[in-house]
Image (cartoon, rainbow, N blue to C red):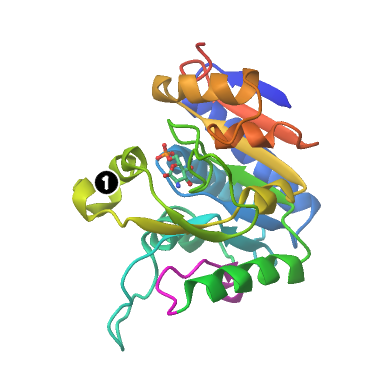
């Protein structure tokens, strides 16, 4: 794996945005995998800015969110049947570029049959030709997507039970109340992630330093799900100084 360290989170966002924009220009029909979480906010802001300055055409880009909470189905006729992560990615990125709504694929955490929804998602990724570029965050406990530390990990998109620490880390999306963060989520599996042709994992801030060290210098272990990505042939870990401090 390649590790790039930037002086600040802002420098990192600008450099990575340029990389994403160049990838879209090189392959206008690119299939992107997109994370939610606080880390990508600055990145998405930089991608939107770079797309405007360079007049980047997103009309053929296809996007796949990496994970989504399992939430109760919205009442019939409700305007917004999007899940929390889907809304988040729309607000910070997809509503601000000219991506075609029909090219946005999302995991539906309100699906009546969650296992069938996971299978549908795997098929949708394959039908699209696979993920070209997958952007990933990392949890402070080493999770990627919602693949939590465990004795063994799921290969494919599945229903995950969230660790207590992960529910706390996501409370900001639920009125800062960890008690109402869903217990379950849907997530691409480690195999789904490994199948992406290129992975860029981003971590900023000192609270990610331990997970970054475990992922990059430790043995591969399911207790550190991100470490399972080590054998990927095209993996870049992008850090600010705080996340790289160890
Ligand atoms: C969350 C999500 C991940 C995200 C990670 C880091 O729980 N499941 O997709 O990458 O944890 O989140 P953040 O960037 O807010 O630290």
Q: Position of residue 236 (x, y in %)?
A: 69, 31
Q: Residue furthest bottom?
A: 77
Q: Is residue 11 visible?
A: yes
Q: Position of residue 20 (x, y in %)?
A: 66, 44
Classify 122 as above or below 234. Answer: below
Residue at image coords 53%, 67%: 106
Q: Considering the numbered disc 1 on the image, is that residue within a helix, a strand or a loop?
A: helix
Please state if 120 lies on the left or on the right of 150 as rendered.
right
Q: Give ligand 1's quarter of the image.
A: top left
Q: Position of residue 101 (x, y in %)?
A: 55, 73
Residue at image coords 67%, 60%: 57
Question: Camera-side residue: 131 or 228?
Answer: 228
Please state if 185 lies on the left or on the right of 152 as rendered.
left
Question: Camera-side residue: 119 or 203?
Answer: 119
Classify 236 as above or below 180. Answer: above
**Label 1 environment density (alpha carbons within 10 Å; few <14, some 14–19, many ≥20):** some
Residue at image coords 20%, 46%: 176
Task: Decide whether residue 109 is among the magenta residues.
Answer: yes
Instruction: Tell me which segment is drawn in magenta.
Output: 100-112
Numbered marks: total: 1
Helix, strand or loop: magenta stretch: loop
Name the image quarter holding the N terminus: top right
Residue at image coords 46%, 17%: 242
Task: Decide whether residue 239 is among the magenta residues.
Answer: no
Classify 14 as above or below 170. Answer: above
Question: Camera-side residue: 131 or 142?
Answer: 142
The residue to which callout 1 is attached is 171
């Amino acid at each position: 794996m390649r590790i790039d360290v930037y002086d600040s989170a802002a420098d990192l966002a600008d450099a990575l945005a340029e990389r994403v924009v160049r990838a879209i220009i090189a392959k206008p029909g690119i299939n992107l995998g997109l994370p939610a979480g606080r880390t990508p906010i600055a990145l998405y802001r930089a991608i939107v800015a770079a797309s405007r300055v360079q007049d980047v055409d997103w009309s053929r880009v296809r996007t796949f969110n990496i994970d989504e909470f399992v939430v109760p189905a919205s009442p019939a006729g409700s305007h917004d049947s999007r899940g929390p992560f889907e809304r988040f990615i729309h607000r910070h990125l997809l509503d601000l570029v000219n991506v075609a709504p029909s090219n946005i694929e999302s995991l539906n955490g309100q699906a009546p049959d969650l296992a069938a929804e996971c299978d549908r998602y795997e098929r949708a990724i394959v039908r699209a030709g696979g993920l070209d570029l997958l952007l990933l965050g990392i949890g402070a406990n080493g999770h990627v997507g919602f693949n939590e530390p465990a004795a063994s990990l799921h290969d494919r998109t599945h229903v995950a039970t969230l660790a207590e620490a992960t529910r706390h880390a996501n409370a900001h999306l639920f009125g800062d109340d960890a008690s109402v963060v869903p217990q379950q989520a849907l997530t691409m599996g480690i195999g789904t992630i490994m199948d992406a042709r290129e992975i860029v994992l981003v971590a900023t801030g000192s609270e990610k330093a331990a997970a970054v060290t475990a992922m990059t210098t430790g043995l591969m272990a399911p207790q550190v799900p991100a470490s399972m990505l080590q054998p990927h042939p095209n993996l870049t870990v992008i850090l600010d100084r705080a996340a790289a401090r160890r």
